[in-house]
Image (cartoon, rainbow, N blue to C red):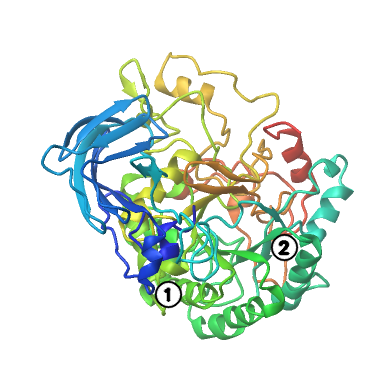
């Protein structure tokens, strides 16, 4: 979900993540509380590799009780091992916490708290639904107050903009896809519209501008709900660790970014003509994570990223975009969160979440301006590796010590996105945030897709023989050979995930294989050169890039055909 049910009524936050502190909001209308029969505040206070400690507070807004029982279910392997201030039992994934003899009384408006320790393996996903004596908590029961129904907040936003909605099919991308042999099989899929330079707002080189796309979305909408996916991507000193996606604005041009890029976009999106659309804005791909991983004394540091860390313009720009766009009721901001092969390591994971919180509370922005986060945008990390887990060992050696995993905590995007969501909540983001995962190019199907684990000769043969992601190194990002289309766009596919999306339009190049003169501010990055032998950011491996690629964003027919051939699920 991207909004809590309780946010609708100004009640307690539904969930809080690891080490998080729940935030209580005073309702503007006390009658609104009565419409919520109960609220449950679930917090993970401490978490380690195999277990966690949680605290739960229950508030009763119905008739007074002399006994009570709270129930919820886990989506994973969580097992309660001990508890206090409640009698806690578990059957399968279902947990029941009943009162002790000394705390059975629960007055109207009264609260009671209890806690427990639990074990888990894999992902410690948060529960999504609670009941008190059989009545669902944190949801408007329809008895009055609140308004808008259980699926929205006072701004009119819904919990998950993708739920129950069609998603805009970009006619320009659709036409290119349909013109390819076999492309008609996917040309009706929704993809992101990239606003990657100022000229894109009004339409560059004969392409559709923002208003044209929104008008087309209204035409596609009909009487139902429609999501439009926009990529807002033109920060000063953009993508400081790569050249192919460098932008038009220099490192110091923050004022130009605000007044000539964000402000015009906000003015168009705020037009009442488009109020019936659900507008998803993906904010500044590949920016903030660079400040964590590619600065300072790290081997992966670049002078450009050090500059952007020092001048603060990534943080300022993202905060300004969140504030301006978040003020529009039908806009849903999703902030870029890299991918597991970037910030899944221990020394990147928590610092990234902290930095995102800093950006989301700068330049007038608040965490309420963030509907969620997106991972794997324009990247290739497999959604789910089924042939091995991070907890596996081979001849006594952990999978984490394999050359491919290289001490990372995660082996795929789904487990990373769910865990990172918990981390984001723990640093102060709203507990109802949802995650998007870009699956446009992470299917890794075709004839070479492994059908089972690799040989147990060594941890490397085990991982390499079973992994779907067939890149040479997880840091390779440009036009990867062997990649395929991933899961088709869909809403609410997994716990904590608002949608799988194709934010990167399949068939659009990541960068040119050789230097090409252009007026788009796009440089030549050797990571797009198939002959390149690498740098510290990919551990000095070959780039794995396809040959003969055009500039980033330009149509790359050979790549599109490969993506269809290697699609998984197959076309």
- Closer-to-camera residue (555/107): 107
- Left or right side of 197 for 534: left
Quadrant location of residue 46? top left
Quick one: label 1 or label 2, which is nearer the N terminus?
1
Q: Residues within 10 Å of mark 1 (few under 14, many from 20)?
A: many
Helix, strand or loop for disc 2? loop
| Distance in Å between CA atoms under marks 1 and 2 | 39 Å
In this figure, which residue is indicated by the disc labeled 1?
Answer: 365
**Is 398 drawn above or below residue 536 in the view shown?**
above
Quadrant location of residue 208? bottom right
Which is closer to the viewer, label 1 or label 2?
1
Please state the horizontal and vertical placement of residue 427, each as a whole percent of the image. Answer: 31, 58
**Is 92 drawn above or below residue 528 in the view shown?**
above
Quadrant location of residue 91? top left
Helix, strand or loop for disc 1? loop
Please state the horizontal and vertical placement of residue 131, each as a whole percent of the image. Answer: 37, 43
Q: Residue at x 33, y 59 (%)?
A: 12
Instruction: Say which quadrant the C terminus sits in.
Output: top right
Q: Which numbered disc covers residue 516? A: 2
């Amino acid at each position: 979900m991207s909004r809590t049910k309780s946010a609708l009524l100004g009640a307690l936050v539904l969930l809080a993540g690891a080490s998080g502190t729940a935030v209580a909001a005073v309702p503007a209308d006390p009658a609104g509380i009565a419409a919520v029969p109960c609220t449950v505040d679930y917090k993970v206070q401490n978490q380690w590799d195999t277990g966690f400690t949680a605290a739960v507070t229950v508030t009763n807004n119905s008739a007074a009780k002399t006994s009570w029982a709270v129930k919820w279910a886990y989506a994973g392997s969580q097992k309660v091992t001990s508890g206090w201030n409640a009698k806690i039992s578990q059957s399968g994934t279902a947990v029941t916490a009943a009162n002790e003899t000394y705390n059975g009384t629960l007055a109207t408006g009264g609260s009671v708290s209890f806690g427990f320790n639990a074990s888990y393996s894999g992902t410690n996903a948060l529960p999504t639904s609670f009941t008190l004596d059989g009545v669902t908590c944190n949801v408007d029961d329809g008895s009055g107050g609140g308004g808008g129904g259980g699926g929205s907040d006072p701004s009119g936003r819904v919990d998950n903009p993708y739920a129950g909605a069609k998603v805009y099919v970009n006619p320009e991308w659709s036409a290119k896809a349909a013109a390819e042999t076999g492309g008609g099989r996917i040309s009706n899929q929704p993809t992101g519209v990239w606003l990657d330079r100022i000229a894109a707002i009004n339409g560059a080189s004969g392409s559709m501008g923002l208003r044209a796309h929104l008008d087309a979305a209204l035409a596609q909408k009909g009487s139902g709900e429609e999501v439009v996916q926009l990529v807002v991507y033109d920060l000063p000193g953009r993508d400081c660790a790569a050249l192919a996606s460098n932008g038009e604005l220099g490192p110091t041009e923050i004022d130009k970014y605000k007044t000539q890029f964000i402000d015009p976009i906000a003015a168009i999106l705020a037009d009442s003509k488009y109020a019936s659309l659900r507008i998803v804005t993906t904010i500044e791909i590949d920016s903030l994570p660079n400040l964590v991983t590619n600065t300072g004394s790290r081997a992966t540091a670049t002078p450009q990223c050090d500059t952007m860390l020092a001048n603060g313009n990534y943080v300022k720009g993202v905060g300004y975009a969140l504030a301006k766009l978040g003020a529009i009721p039908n806009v849903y901001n999703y902030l870029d969160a890299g991918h597991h092969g970037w910030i899944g390591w221990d020394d990147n994971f928590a610092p990234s979440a902290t930095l995102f919180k800093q950006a989301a509370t700068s330049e007038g922005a608040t965490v309420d301006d963030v509907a969620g986060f997106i991972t794997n945008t324009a990247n290739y990390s497999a959604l789910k590796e089924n042939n091995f887990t991070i907890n596996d060992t081979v001849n006594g050696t952990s999978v984490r010590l394999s050359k491919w995993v290289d001490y990372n905590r995660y082996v795929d995007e789904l487990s990373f996105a769910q865990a990172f969501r918990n981390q984001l909540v723990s640093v102060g983001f709203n507990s109802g945030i949802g995650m998007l995962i870009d699956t446009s190019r992470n299917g890794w199907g075709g004839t070479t897709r492994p059908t089972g684990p690799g040989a147990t000769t060594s941890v490397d043969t085990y991982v390499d023989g079973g992994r779907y992601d067939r890149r040479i190194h997880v840091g390779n990002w440009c036009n990867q050979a062997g990649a395929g289309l991933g899961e088709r766009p869909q809403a609410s596919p997994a716990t904590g995930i608002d949608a799988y999306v194709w934010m990167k339009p399949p068939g659009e190049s990541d960068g040119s294989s050789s230097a090409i003169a252009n007026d788009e501010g796009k440089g030549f990055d050797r990571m797009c050169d198939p002959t390149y032998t690498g740098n510290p950011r990919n551990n000095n491996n070959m780039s794995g890039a396809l040959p003969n690629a055009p500039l980033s964003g330009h149509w790359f027919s050979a790549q599109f055909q490969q993506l269809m051939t290697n699609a998984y699920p197959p076309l």
